[in-house]
């Protein structure tokens, strides 16, 4: 039986909590280590299932990974032993496709399983492949695998539509070793893309404009080693802010960077939370009852789709009607049916969810379907009257480090049951 979380709701959370380093930065940063034979030292690496998966993948490709404790990993791939990302790893974690760019750039060859769909939508990788083809790679699909080959990639002009985060990261990692200059237009502007560019620059890459929608990369012959501290997780930080708000508590999140989450902070304030923003801390004081507000998910700096489910849990308790429109993924409302089991009144029509706030949730057994959906169920459970049991917590372990310990320190009654 997979583990569950048992939550006794109703306690306002109080105190301080640290945001760990960002999962969605750690994964591309680890993949970037494939671009050099020199060591890459990453500090602050979060202890997460997805990090363990990428570690296994990189080791299969020839990386030696030393764990020096306190979250410090040294990754070194002196020689590539394989150029294949197998289906069992790619199917457990789509981010595995981010070895494609570095492998082709370094060795001229990659074979990566096609990820297929997942709970939140179809999630194709056509733009990753088109971009690589623009850089001169020959792409062949063979028995569920993508094979990419190039003697040496050459710079080119790539336009991404829609904006893709891992696509931008994959292509940036491919372009750093290409011959000539690459422009990535309509690039993702997420802070994690900027963090990857920072590491690549330390390794010797020439990148301009990361963090804006046009990134220019001048290819270099080779990259060297570097040391890098991973940026804090804005989605984890946002989740703890909602935990403070939804329980009517008073929570300070350390390692929360306000300009990494402008839209989430704006919506929390519209929902009646009082925020105090410091240089790397944010304090939230929850309202007696949230106010309704509408939101539309969008690429950064818009409202993050990765915070949509958590915000829905909060708005489900608002004094009035809210509308959430999901524009990034076509099927990211799996949490709605589970929130309804706790008494929420939410109806969905296509990519819109209409939420009629109820005064309280009632604890219930619920099932997690994906990482952020699971987080929303935990948040609803913290606010609910009675006991909530969230099953399939392995989804949460992919992206939240020591969740029950951190929430427990804030006063939540939450325990893991196997
Ligand atoms: N898309 C395409 N073609 C492509 C690539 C993407 O049509 O080749 C579409 C997708 O189907 C989607 C949209 O573009 O509709 C945006 O997807 P994107 O590629 O940006 O998503 P991703 O890079 O696969 C990352 C995060 C996700 C996060 C999204 C959106 C990582 C490892 N994952 O995924 O994080 O939801 O960006 O911000 O960075 C999570 O942490 O729970 C998570 C799912």
Image: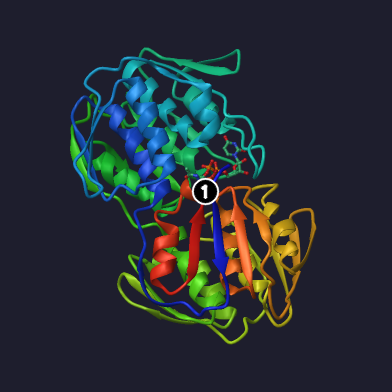
Whether residue 17 is situated above or below residue 65 in the rendered picture: below
* Residue 137 appears in the figure: yes
Farthest residue in the bottom direction? 288
State which quadrant residue 218 falls in: top left
In this image, 47 relative to 132: left or right? left
Viewer-proximal residue among 383 and 329: 383
Task: Give residue 208's position: percent from left, percent from top.
Answer: 32, 45
Task: Give residue 136's position: percent from left, percent from top.
Answer: 45, 19
Viewer-proximal residue among 215 and 329: 329
Whether residue 221 is situated above or below residue 241 in the rendered picture: above
In this image, 116 relative to 355: left or right? left
Task: Give residue 36's position: percent from left, percent from top.
Answer: 24, 27
Whether residue 248 is situated above or below residue 258 in the rendered picture: below
* Quadrant in which the N terminus appears: top right
In this image, 107 relative to 244: left or right? left
Q: Tell me what residue is drawn at x 64 percent, y 34 percent.
A: 117
Q: Secondary structure at mark 1?
A: loop
Q: Which residue is mark 1?
A: 418
In this image, 251 relative to 116: left or right? left
Viewer-proximal residue among 263 and 395: 395
Mark 1 surroundings: few (<14), some (14-19) or many (≥20) residues within 10 A: few
Viewer-proximal residue among 190 and 257: 257
Quadrant position of ligand 1 = top right
Q: Tell me what residue is drawn at x 47 percent, y 25 percent.
A: 132
Does the numbered disc 1 mark a residue whose Cβ is under 8 Å from ligand 1? no
Q: How is the protein colored in the picture?
A: rainbow
Q: Tell me what residue is drawn at x 37 percent, y 62 percent.
A: 19
State which quadrant residue 356 falls in: bottom right
* Residue 178 appears in the figure: no
Q: Tell me what residue is drawn at x 18 percent, y 28 percent.
A: 38
């Amino acid at each position: 039986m997979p583990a569950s979380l048992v939550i006794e709701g109703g306690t306002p959370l109080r105190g301080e909590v640290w945001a760990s380093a960002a999962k969605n930065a750690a994964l591309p940063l680890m993949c970037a280590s494939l671009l050099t034979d020199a060591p890459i030292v990453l500090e602050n690496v979060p202890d997460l299932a997805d990090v363990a998966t990428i570690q296994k993948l990189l080791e299969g490709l020839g990386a030696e990974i030393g764990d020096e404790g306190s979250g410090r990993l040294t990754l070194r791939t002196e020689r590539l032993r394989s150029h294949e990302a197998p289906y069992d790893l790619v199917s457990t974690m789509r981010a595995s496709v981010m070895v494609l760019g570095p492998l082709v750039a370094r060795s001229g060859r990659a074979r990566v399983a096609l990820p297929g769909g997942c709970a939140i939508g179809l999630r194709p990788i056509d733009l990753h492949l088109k971009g690589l083809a623009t850089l001169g790679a020959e792409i062949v699909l063979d028995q569920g695998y993508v094979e990419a080959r190039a003697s040496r990639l050459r710079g080119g002009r790539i336009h991404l539509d829609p904006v893709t985060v891992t696509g931008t990261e994959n292509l940036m990692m491919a372009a750093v070793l290409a011959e000539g200059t690459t422009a990535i237009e309509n690039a993702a502007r997420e802070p994690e893309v900027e963090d990857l560019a920072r590491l690549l620059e330390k390794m010797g890459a020439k990148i301009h404009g990361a963090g804006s929608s046009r990134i220019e990369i001048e290819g270099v012959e080779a990259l060297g080693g570097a040391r890098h501290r991973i940026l804090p997780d804005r989605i984890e930080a946002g989740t703890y802010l909602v935990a403070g708000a939804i329980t009517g508590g008073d929570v300070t999140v350390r390692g929360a960077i306000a300009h990494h989450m402008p839209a989430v902070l704006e919506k929390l304030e519209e929902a009646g939370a009082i925020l105090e923003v410091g240089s790397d801390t944010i304090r939230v004081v929850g309202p007696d009852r949230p106010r309704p507000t509408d939101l539309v998910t969008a690429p950064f700096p818009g409202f993050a789709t990765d915070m949509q489910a958590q915000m829905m849990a909060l708005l489900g308790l608002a004094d009035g009607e809210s509308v959430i429109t999901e524009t990034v993924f076509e099927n990211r409302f799996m949490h709605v049916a589970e929130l309804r089991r706790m008494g929420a009144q939410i109806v969905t029509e296509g990519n819109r969810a209409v939420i009629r706030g109820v005064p309280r949730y009632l604890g219930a057994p619920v099932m997690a379907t994906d990482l952020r959906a699971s987080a929303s169920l935990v948040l609803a459970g913290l606010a609910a009257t009675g006991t909530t049991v969230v099953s399939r917590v392995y989804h949460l372990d992919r992206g939240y480090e020591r969740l029950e310990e951190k929430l427990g320190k804030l006063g939540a009654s939450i325990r893991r049951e196997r």
